[in-house]
Amino acid sequence: METATLARGCLRVPDSRAPASRVSEVGGAERGGDEEGGRSAPDGWSSPGGGAPALGIPRRARIIRPRGEDLQAARLTPLLAELNDIDLAAVLGEAQTIVTTAAGRLFDVNRPVQRLAIVLQGLVHCLGPGDTVMDVAGPGAVLGLMSLFDPQGYACSSKVLGGSRLLMLSAAALRRGVAERPGVRQAVIRALGQERRTLTQALWDLKSLSPSRRLAQLILYLACQDTVENREAVRLPVSKAVMASCLGMRAESLSRALNRLEAHGVMREGEGIRVADRVALRRFCDCS
């Protein structure tokens, strides 16, 4: 399953085998919170403005026991996909599910790594200096893995959007698994290798491709993820401003890039985008 990112892979919200429809709706989790052990944030899980905790969530978010479908979806990620039942139990034994109804801080840069997050539903913004959006992670993404053994803490800050559902893994449990269980150790090494490959590709694209080519690749990718074959309208999972930020360009550069792509089958439709000639767009993406 492909890792979900926007900057690291030009907004790769993947064609996950664990689609959002497999996880329960946020509203249902809120209504049934007490039955599932739902509770408000405990100490160390405070809301924004509470003193920059290692893990912060909005006041209206809920922490609940993971449902079966949460664990099934998490098991489809590269990190957990090949673990046997015993190793999986060791990694997920302290896992908790977070359900959000409003946006809020998730991780803070350079804070100690206490948790990893697997996105089950919704989106998480990965933030750079000045809270610039560097990346957008969707269902299937594992956040915090690259910093698991980094003594400096999380490599970047992140903000989870409202309407999201995350499975939070204990970093300590995962470190113990790496130390004691060969299967967990191999899984982490394999997942880190995939993360590095994705980051290397994103760096190569940023250095070698023009803004128009980077945008074209993203639009073609999103068009190909549509379950309705040959539909021209492209669903944008984020705003054009966030797209521009993740692709390493200003909003005006994105607008100019869209203008250039009209010659390759891409048309604007209000705030949306339409691909009138997918063959021409693919030819532009594939050209050297």
Image (cartoon, helix red, strand yellow):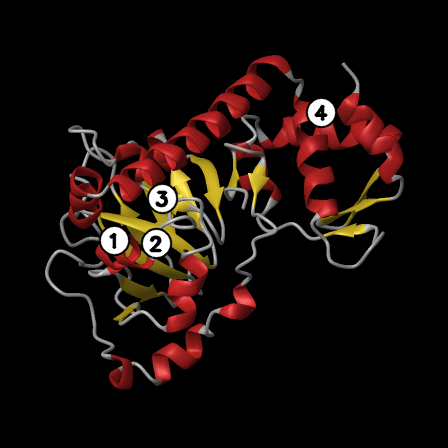
Residue 54, visible in the rendered structure: yes
Q: Do the residues labelled 1 and 2 touch (CB within 8 Å)?
A: no
* Residue labelled with disc 2: 84
Task: Please state which of the two labelled residues, at mark 4 or mark 3, is closer to the viewer.
Answer: 3
* Residue name at image x 56 percent, y 57 percent: 17
C-alpha span from label 1 to label 4: 42 Å
Query: Please, what is the three-letter code of the amino acid marked with disc 3?
Result: Leu
Q: Can you give x and y, in whole percent of width and height, for residue 211 in the image?
A: 66, 23
In the foreground, 63 or 258: 63
Is residue 161 at least partly visible in the picture? no
Residue at image location 89% in from the left, 39% down from the top:
277
Cα distance between the residues tagged 2 and 4: 44 Å
Which mark, by number, is residue 91?
1
- At label 2, counting other C-alpha atoms closer than 10 Å, the crowd grade (few under 14, some 14-19, many 20 or more) is few
In front: label 1 or label 3: 1
Q: Earlier in the sequence, mark 4 or mark 3?
A: 3
Cα separation between marks 2 and 3:
22 Å
What residue is shown with label 3? 143
Between disc 1 and disc 4, whose residue precedes? 1
Q: Could you tell me residue 91's position as x and y percent? A: 25, 53
